[in-house]
Amino acid sequence: MIRLHTAEPDFADRFTALVEDRRESSTDVARDVAAIIAAVRSDGETAVAELTRRHDRHDLATTGWRIAPEDCAAAFDALDPDLRAALELAATRIRAYHEKQRPTDTDYVDAAGVRLGARWRAVDAAGIYVPGGRAAYPSSLLMNAIPARVAGVGRLAMVTPTPDGQISALVLAAAHLAGVDEVWRIGGAQAIAALAYGAGPIAPVDIITGPGNAWVAEAKRQVYGVVGIDMVAGPSEIVVVADGLNDPEWIAADLLSQAEHDVTTQSILFTDDDAFADRVAAAVDRQLDTLGTGTTARTAWKANGAIVVTSTLEDAMPLVDRLAPEHLQLAIDDPQALFDRVRHAGSVFLGRHTPEAIGDYVAGPNHVLPTGRRARFASGLSVLDFMKRTSFLGLDEAALRELGPATVALAEAEGLPAHARSVALRLRLNR
């Protein structure tokens, strides 16, 4: 963990180094992933089965490629009532939030008499990747599947690795609750390739979403263009802006809520109170000693964590924008003034009683968010990611007379005579 203060003479250089630090896996996986994709495209079912035997240690011919819908329903019915209620609450709130994202078609006639508009339609099929190795995340399944359903996607196929043939019952329950049509027992780059190109019983999809490791992220990058993808996500991150009136134990827990994900995650605190910074650092150390995920969190905190002390919290906001964090907490009594200054963040959590962890599960907004400073140009997963817009226009003879001459002039200026002629003939111009 590094400690910075804006008053230090080398602050600018050290903070720039923090901003530009790349925490993505240093392993060069591009060549391996390209080989896996090529194998799946060439050998399909055989390649996926072999890669599954090698990496997940089970034979799809024995365990089965697909998990039956009735198995997902049974997993849901068998849940502890409190856990089932929590899952249902999350699904209800996620669905309600994303329903408000549905776009509206437009259709109008302008002053020139031209009919113009746009029509929104869902993709035919979407593929969702759900991690199933080191950790299984039913919350991510809901965050990916429910927006797809709200968008109106016709077919929803899910892939998830099942090491030694085992799968989380909670993930199956979430698949049932979200209305997933197909659950396939495969993972890794080979699963992404199977969704993109098809393999054996798996038909190709139009878009692939969902988190995964470096191989999954690279596979999504490589199949983009054949299919759509949500984003190429890197290690998770949180930035907390907090004054000295906070309970340091709360803020320490907020920082560790991301650090426990992976050794490459990043947690950063901005505060205007030196003494509070000390108290938070001490609280982090205490909590690491009792955290079940303490080994991972400790490595992440020591390697990528930071505490930055600024003269005022307002001074922190341009620095936060440079980081463009995935998650941003504004832990103060009146967060709106600071929120108004935020230009780049994946999702913002307002006030002392809004920990980022609430957003991961039941609040409603999507937790699939841009990482690695991509919030400068990208947004979190939404209903729109599963839809495409088709524009349309219609002219009658009078409208063509209104717009045609300018079209002919521009087409001729660009050296495209066939363009010009297609309009001029209708205008009975001598072209």
Image: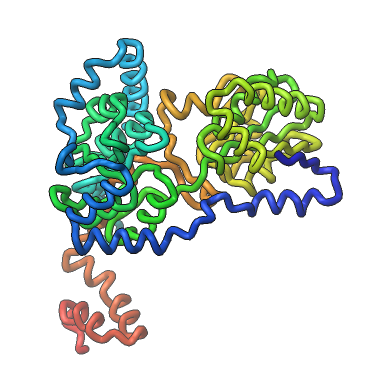
Q: How is the image coloured?
A: rainbow
Q: Looking at the image, which residue is at 22% across and 84% down? A: 418
Q: Quadrant of the N terminus?
A: top right
- Residue 62 is drawn in which quadrant? top left
Q: Looking at the image, which residue is at 45% across and 48% down? A: 233
Give percent across and percent down for residue 313: 73, 34
Give percent across and percent down for residue 187: 30, 45
Q: On screen, 350 above or below 155?
A: above
Q: Is residue 74 visible?
A: yes
Give percent across and percent down for residue 28: 48, 60
Q: On screen, 276 above or below 143?
A: above
- Residue 218 is drawn in which quadrant? bottom left
Is 35 or 56 nearer to us in this picture? Answer: 56
Q: Quadrant of the C terminus?
A: bottom left
Q: How many marks?
A: 0
In the displayed structure, does residue 11 sit left or right of residue 296? right
Is 426 or 40 nearer to us in this picture? Answer: 40
- Residue 179 is drawn in which quadrant? top left
Q: Looking at the image, which residue is at 19% across and 57% down? A: 44
In the displayed structure, does residue 177 sit left or right of residue 288? left
Q: On screen, 316 above or below 377?
A: above
Q: On screen, 147 above or below 292?
A: below
Instruction: Please identify the residue farthest to the top as the structure is shown.
Output: 81
Give percent across and percent down for residue 344: 57, 45
Is 248 or 354 nearer to us in this picture? Answer: 248
Q: Looking at the image, which residue is at 25% across and 82% down? A: 420
Q: Is residue 100 visible?
A: no
